[in-house]
Amino acid sequence: MEMQYAYSLCDCMEELEKIESETFGRAEYLYMGSYFCDLYFIGISQSMWEESFSFARRNKKTAVLVVPTPSQRNMEKLKETICKLLRENGDVLKEVAVNDFGMLRFIDGLGLHLSVWCGRLMSRETRDPRYPEFVQSNKLSQRMADGTLCGVRVKGLELDTLGKETAEITDKTMVSLHIPYTYITMGRYCELGSIGLPPEKKFRLWDTCSRSCQRFWNVYRNDQADFLKYGRAVYAEGIQVPEGNIHRLIYNGIFDKIHNLEKEDSKAERRRRT
């Protein structure tokens, strides 16, 4: 099978009109939504959703809706948003990536015959570059050998690193690989989400999303590994795309966003010096 290419605007959909990437140009699929934050997902405005799907239509991209794992508090709102998006954009929205078993069954229960992917959060194995074995063991792939998971037909499995089990995935299941940021871990809190608030109002799980992740993030260096804390997620950079049983590469738009800003800052600094 010929390699497929995708561009992900997940968790950075505000960058939609700023895309200037060769990777985007060759991408057949456009990923929308969020992998890590249900508050971000339900906080996406109707106008932004409409603009995003119109953008996909104009650029002849197949839209993929990425659904985060919801909290109990936000579950009904998340479901309502999903149903509305699927109902209004069926001409371009053909695939859904889910990140927990509950959403897998919910999407299947809608009876819309969509292509469903098991998102990157459904593989819980270690993928930390500080360990010598910087690979996922991909145990979930063994449960999907017949092309189903919990009785639900799935199109494929999303991964961040590749282990030897990947070669054992049958032709009934596709494999997507996220590049160039590797997801390492995540938490329930977005520590920068309450920036500017007094101490007694910080770190409230039930507060609405302030979109702080679009303006602020942290970079850490630990044991000769670089980490990015963006919203609720922690990423590492620098994974090499290996040869192997990979059907789709998903390029993370957050990488372009951050590196473009770094270039602008560098140019501004040079102008100040001259």
Image: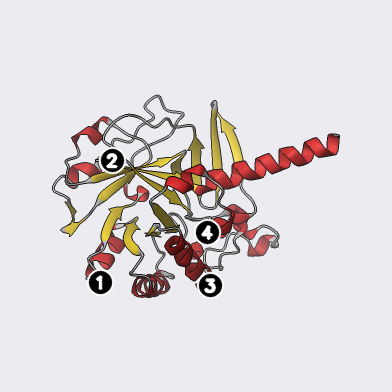
Q: Quadrant of the C terminus?
A: top right
> In what element is the residue under mark 3?
helix
Q: What amino acid is labelled 1 in the image?
A: Leu
- Neighbor class of circle 1 (other Cα within 10 Å; few <14, some 14-19, many 20+) is few
Q: Which residue is mark 3?
A: 47
Residue 43 in view: no
Residue 13 drawn at (x, y percent): 52, 59
Secondary structure at numbered mark 2: loop
Residue at left offset 44%, top offset 43%: 183
Q: Amino acid at mark 3?
A: Ser
Query: Which residue lies under the disc numbered 4?
Result: 13
Count neighbours of disc 4 (C-alpha within 10 A) and say few if under 14, some if 14 to 19, many if 20 or more.
Answer: many
| Residues under numbered marks 4 and 2 in contact, where contact means CB atoms less than 8 Å apart | no
Please tell me which residue lies in front, 205 or 17: 17
Q: Earlier in the sequence, mark 2 or mark 3?
A: 2
Q: Secondary structure at mark 4?
A: helix
State the residue at coordinates (42%, 28%): 131
Name above or below for residue 264 compared with residue 132.
Answer: below
